[in-house]
Image: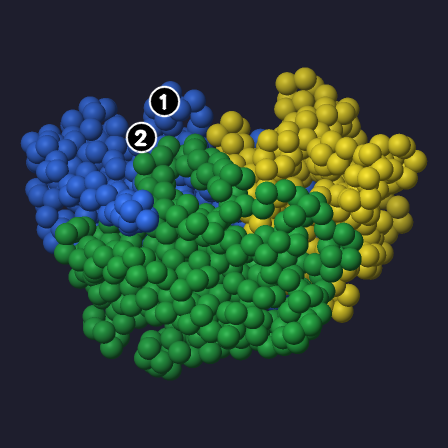
Chain colours: A green, B yellow, C blue
Amino acid sequence: MRTLTRRQISVFAIVLILLILYPLFVRGSFPLHIMIMVFLFAMMGVAWNIMGGYAGMFSFGQAAFFGIGAYTSSYLLVTYHVSPWIGLLAGGLLAALAAAVIGIPCSNLRGHYFAIASIAFAEIVRIHFNNWKLVGAAEGLTLPILNQSLRNFEFHSSKVPYYYILLGFLIFSLLICSWVSTSRMGFYFRAIKESHDLAKVVGINFVRYRLAAIMISAFLTAIAGTFYAQYILYLDPESVLILPISIQVVLVAMLGGAGSIMGPVIGAAILLPISEGTRVWLGFKGTGIDMIVYGTLIMLISAYHPQGVWGLFSRIGERAPSAAHAAEQSIASAGAGTRDATSASPADRGGEGRSES
Amino acid sequence: MGGDLLQQVVNSFLIGSVYALVAIGLTLIWGVMNIVNFAHGEFLMIGMFIAFWSYTLLHLDPILSIPICAAVLFILGAASYRFIVSKVMTGPILAQLVVTFGLSIFLANLAVLLWTPDFRLIEKPLLNGTWTLGNVQLSIPKFVASLGSVLVSAGILLFLRKTKTGKAILAVEMNRESALLVGINTERINALSFGVGAALVGIAGAFLSMYYYIYPQVGGLFGLISFCIVALGGFGSIEGAFIAGILVGFVQTLGGYYFDPAYKYALVFLVYLITVWIRPQGLLGW
Amino acid sequence: MGNVTRRNFLIGGSALAVSAWMVPPVFAAPKTIKIGGLYPLTGNLASTGLDCRRGAEMAVEIINGKYDLNLPLAKTEGLPDLGGAKIEMVWADTKGEPKNGQAEAERVVTQDGVVGVIGAYQSSVTKTASQATERLRVPYVCSDSSSPTLTERGLKYFFRVSPHDGIFAHDQFNFLKDLERIKKQKVQSVALLYENTEFGSNVGKQEQKYAQEYGYKVVEDISYTANATDVTSEVGRLIKTNPDVLMHASYITDAILFTKTFKEMGFNPKGMLTMAGYIEPGYLPAVKADGDYIIVRSTFALDLAKSKPLVGKVNELFKKKYGIDMSENAARSFTAPFVFADAINRAKTTEPEAVVKALHDTNIPGDQVIYPWKGVKFDPQSNQNIYATGTLVQIQNQQYVTVWPFESAAKDLVWPFPAWKSRK
């Protein structure tokens, strides 16, 4: 990802100002709730990008980190009255640790293999939490309703403080992502993505950087989890550890443009209002039309515009012209790891499972 | 009666063989065009519904509706490839992963729209009841499903090895470029494989409908397990998928029996993870 | 790059536009009282959500219209002490997710101006929805969620009319004691089987508690995934431990699967006491005669019409409107609108504090409810209806018949559970 042009920066500044002013113009808890959901998934999408869009590790199991974050801070609060802010850090660290533990053996996996392994991992976490009496098992944890304050990380009379806190978290995540992409780590990721062999020759230590990416991603996702817990004040495995959350994160990043910093933000801004909106306007009929629309949208985007919305105004968002070229050409497109499946040879493809390190 | 190891072993095989059939369809698609069909569970669900409607409207026993399930799913699979999946073949891997997710959401909710979320059951399949063989209770519908799955698996293996089309499919699986050089129409093979893969899971759906309840979201867990089975067995390996399917049946059933039923699926996923770490290409993958 | 700027604005602005469109609630016409109904109208539990919704809709129709029924406010059109104002339901789809419970509760209160909320069937969703209404200080009357924890949170605005799982579990053990005392059938061991979400595991916990208290031996305690692909491991374990009685808390999918597997593997305890899934309308059509002799906890049974004609009349109306008999879920959701309407009517206003006070003063007599309760009266601390009790029904000839309490049973209990092989 190139550094942003001055024009782009000024555009973002304007959008940021609008977002800051938004709660002043728009009253009502539902519009704020939608934006909070947008920020939440934007943040998780950005976190996902760090390991997926940039380093090519497509995780379909982010819910595991989301849940670990939410549960850690909530458990500490409920049992030991630890401040949610400290719990937030603890959750992040624990998630990063879990990411390292799973990341080391999985660091050799790529593409489809990694995706499925991430699903398997997340499901194991979910099933375990569902049976773990310490954290309430299936009943989950109910957070105490405390006096509203920043210190308690709880607000009752208005959602506005939640809005700004999460916006702050989102900006923080974007900065981290930007730092990753412009740092040496980001450079190495692009190298790995564009050509395995070249990177190997140059001697880049894959494992270490991949691990770093996974851990940062997990850390940020866990913070989002803590926010969720403090926002809803109740969590159980079915609300924070399920596969649909992980999928939503991927969709947000992909729709917006995986491999771009702002991509997930745009993706979330589009997908979340649609998802919330269709439920409100179409869902109550019970016909499933809202999800049919959703599914169709996903197919269309994947098929016809996989580089996402960001690719619309990024000149570099070209799709691979033909099968034969794709695997070799270095395309710094917003799509992560452009690679034509059809031209993959067995070594490559089976080697989707293993790569040099 | 029925509470001991032998019973559980039998049950392992019964569920495992159905898993195997589901997984074989998936591995075929995967092997040929490197696409994970995340809508595979929904194909299963549609197969089950076809069997149900054939039973309800045409009074056809599930066994007899197998050809219908296979045919409809074949068309659905080939069409999915032709109109949707083929567009992402030249695109980013992420798009390939995600497009079939979209298809799965679409199909599951289309089913809700068309058939409501209610649960259906085929009440009186032709082959019903239980055999008692010594200490073991053998459910007849499950046995038939299992036997059928084994036969169909063997059948598809023969098809791939012995027929011209089958060999063409295998050729593409092994090396696409060479296949092209030899004059094989890879696009056609892709569509065909998707269709055959879908047909196989459609047949599995017909078998399952003999004893399992049917509803739009039924594909969820079956689909998830089949991904693990395919990866466990090795992408593209039919034999691998079969063995892995049986293996997973054992892990799930014996794990549930001896360890803790609450964790039985976690055990399946764990076995998958461990295998893939030690041997990333799966048991029989290349 | 001018295009870029515009597009970025469009995208950034779209989210703003979407939300700006949601205008604050227009004041309701003075003649309607809006109540929010939160249910899983799509998703896995959609058929249950629909069931519940129908029950509530039926109630609202009766309240708004003029019916010769001995139900609160049935004989008048609308709420007489508010000038005949009618109830208007505002439905919201929770999709079965707790976070939507919160969002939808807030939305219907702040955007649609509802003065009260009912729902949401799933206890985890009711939890967050009622937390939201508590923060917003709006009354919530729940008649279809059964987790005991809901009324243990010390909430001031949340009321529950129906029995909770603690009561149901207690019923099961009272039944076993009665069985021994009156029918002279002894039971020593029980096995607990429950699906692994909040509902099931809570029931499991309650049953453990009462088992200890009443001195029954728990020989097996199994938690499982509701949508399992296969349950032969679980049933295998049950067969191995050979309990006298099985206690099973399930949803409908697992109820079906387990029934088939019990039959297939030949699991024959002396009795099966079950909850929820077995009384869903979809269960018997799916398993037919295989459901016979299973006992289910119930709040509602059609055969209550024998001793309470009101039940029969209401069911007639329901059947005419929807083409099917009233189910347990529909019957439970049927109550909340009445409790609300009764309270609002007595309060003569929709102002929340007054309504809450009126709810505390609720005293609906037993003959005005379609259950075998003494009535509706809320405990001043927990806001739980102290008269909410359950009964046990047994499936006989594919019908649900009340068998306990023995004094009010419609038919005799069949005990022990006839072995599978000996049937048909």
Please give the name of the residue rendered at 61% of the width and 66% of the height, measured from the top-left corner. Answer: A192
Specify whether disc 1 shares its chain with disc 2: yes
Please give the name of the residue rendered at 40% of the width and 64% of the height, measured from the top-left corner. Answer: A3
User: Which chain letter matches label 1?
Assistant: C
Name the residue that disc number 2 marks.
C58
Going by the numbered disc 2, the residue's amino acid type is Met
| Residue C243 location, quadrant | bottom right
As drawn, B28 above or below B274: above
| Residue C78 location, quadrant | top left
Q: CA distance from mark 1 to mark 2?
A: 8 Å
Query: Which of A11/B271 is in front?
Result: A11
| Residue A282 location, quadrant | top left
Asked if residue A12 can be seen in this view, the reply is no
Please give the name of the residue rendered at 74% of the width and 57% of the height, measured from the top-left corner. Answer: A348
Residues at discs 1 and 2 in contact (Cβ within 8 Å): yes
In percent of width and height, residue C48 lies at 45, 39
In percent of width and height, residue C310 lies at 32, 30
* For marks 1 and 2 on the same chain, the one whose residue lies earlier in the sequence: 2
Please give the name of the residue rendered at 64% of the width and 18% of the height, measured from the top-left corner. Answer: B57
Q: How many marks?
A: 2
How many residues crowd mark 1 within 10 Å: few (<14), some (14–19), many (20+)? few
In percent of width and height, residue C7 lies at 31, 45
Going by the numbered disc 1, the residue's amino acid type is Lys
In percent of width and height, residue A5 lies at 34, 60
Element at label 2: helix
Name the residue that disc number 1 marks.
C321
Query: Which of C230/C378 is in front?
Result: C230
- Compared across the picture, whether B171 is left or right of C210 comes to right
